Amino acid sequence: MSESNPPRDGSKAAERLRAAAASVDKPAPSAGAEKRAAEKRIVEKPSPATKPAPAERERIRGAVADKAASERAATAARQARLATADARKAVEPAAAQRPSNAGADARVAAAKLPGGASAPASVRASGPTARGSGRIVPGAGEPYPPLTERMVSGIDAALADTRKSKRIAPRSPRTALEPDPVEMPARRSKSVRHPFVIVGNAIISFFVLAAIAAVVGLVLGKQQFDVPGPLVADRIVNIAHGSGIREIADVLTREGVIDRPWLFVGGVLVLKARQGLKAGEYEFKAHASLRDVIDTIVEGRVVMHQFAVPEGLTSEQIVARLMHNDVLVENIKEIPPEGSLLPDTYDFTRGTPREQIIRRMQRAQQRLIKEIWTHRAPDLPLKTPEQLVILASLVEKETGRPDERSRVAAVFLNRLKQKMRLQSDPTIIYGLVGGKGTLGRPLLKTDIDQPTPYNTYQIDGLPPGPITNPGRASLEAAANPARTRELYFVADGTGGHVFSETYEQHEKNVARLRRLENGGKDHASVGAEPVSSPVPAAPTAADPSPRHRHHHHRR
């Protein structure tokens, strides 16, 4: 099929198309040229009365350059759109009059302009046209991209550059040399920088660190809590009243019981035992662990001291013993009444006041007397508990043997019932020396004849008060005496006594005692001469002889 030349109208349309493409492909003036043109326009303008500052001039130049670039881009885009429209109008009539060519038609149909428009056959053919004739050369490649694609690509690129940045070129050489701007980091919110938030964070951090330190200290302290301590031998340590936890730790460290006072303080606080620490005198065993030390103080296992009061001491003698005890403290204001103190062994701790021991002895005696008086013998010739204590004090001074107390008490009670004088030597001594307890020499006949309120050789019945502090055994013996009729007793030379109901039996017992003593002197004598006969007693209805007495053993 022979080719025919395209119509003249098609040639004219092609020429217009090439002119439009040439105008589009024309390189745009450089940024430097645009800037120089803008500066020239600014210079040519009449300057105002007041010349602007350099920074203001720089800003104006940049604005003018940006506006000029935008106008050129818009003009190029309008020209490209007009050229594309003209090319479409010119190509459509030419394509209708062109002879059919199957291969070329297929290639022309495949080539489409952007937006769905078909490209001209003369432009989208697979081979170039012959120079001057516009004929298509089959098999030949195109020396450059189709004109329409170049136009569209240039338009799209211009539009894209316009959207991306308004600035086409730097405003000035100095601006071009400056580094690119860097975005500033975002500032923290005001709520984060608020003082309360900062303080709260600090407090939380402090507590977290404190908790960590406490856990670490607890673990380390627990490991050392049961380790044997540094104490080499048992030691008694006195913790004074009013001592705090630090004072106690210092005392224990000074005495060598512990070697880490801070661990002692921490252990007490962890165990919540601060309020349980008690003052007192403590004995710590050798190598006692820290746990043993704390338990000993908290449980109050203090060293207990004892104060023993034997039977038969007067109140004055008991007070003297209390004053000689250096473990006790404070003085005794006055000597308690005779017979009001119960002889016994009393436990106390270091630093106990002496008056406190006195009060304990008095309370114990009152409870005991009340108990014994309640269980006394029904036919007892005593009217009050005070008389019971007086009689028990005589029994206490007459004998120290437990098996004789009830018989001695029976002798005194039988004589009271028969209105006989008691004639007890300890009453003579107490009437002479009072609470001192001992005479310091043998009794003389002048002592027996000397009247005192307590001398039972000179008075009837019981003395006005106790002559000593009787113990439980003597009180019970006085309340429940032996069931006998004995009226006399004398020492047997072995620490005991021989009892008798009649005066004749009594004289035989006295003679036996004198033989045992190998002619020794009687304990009651007149001057340096021994008494050869019994001391006379007051005549009574039951005693027909005016010179009968009962002999006894003095303690």
Image: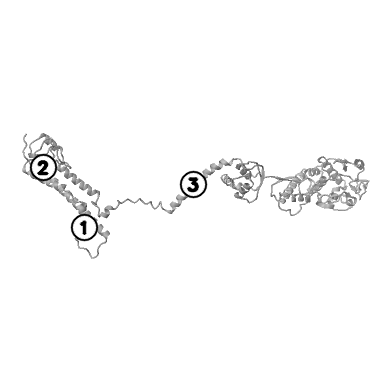
Mark pair 1, 3: CA separation:
67 Å
Q: Nearer the viewer, residue 461 or 94?
A: 94
Q: Nearer the viewer, residue 365 or 190?
A: 190
Rendering coords of residue 357 (x, y %): 72, 49
Say the numbered circle drawn on residue 277: none
Q: Secondary structure at mark 1?
A: helix
Q: Secondary structure at mark 3?
A: helix
- Mark 3 — residue? 209
- Mark 2 — residue? 91
Mark pair 2, 3: CA separation:
86 Å
Residue type highlighted by circle 3: Leu
Q: Residues within 10 Å of mark 3 (few under 14, many from 20)?
A: few
Answer with left or right where residue 551 lies relative to residue 35.
right
Residue type highlighted by circle 1: Glu
Q: Earlier in the sequence, mark 2 or mark 1?
A: 1
Kindly tell me whether residue 377 is visible in this rendering.
Answer: no
* Marks 2, 1: nearer the viewer: 1
Kindly tell me whether residue 447 is visible in this rendering.
Answer: yes
The image quadrant where one finds the N terminus is top left
Answer with left or right where residue 505 lies relative to residue 268.
right
- Mark 1 — residue? 39
Quadrant housing residue 311:
top right
Tell me: residue 7, above or below residue 463. above
Rendering coords of residue 29 (x, y %): 18, 51
Residue type highlighted by circle 2: Val
Mark pair 2, 1: CA separation:
45 Å
Q: Residues within 10 Å of mark 1 (few under 14, many from 20)?
A: some
Q: Earlier in the sequence, mark 2 or mark 3?
A: 2
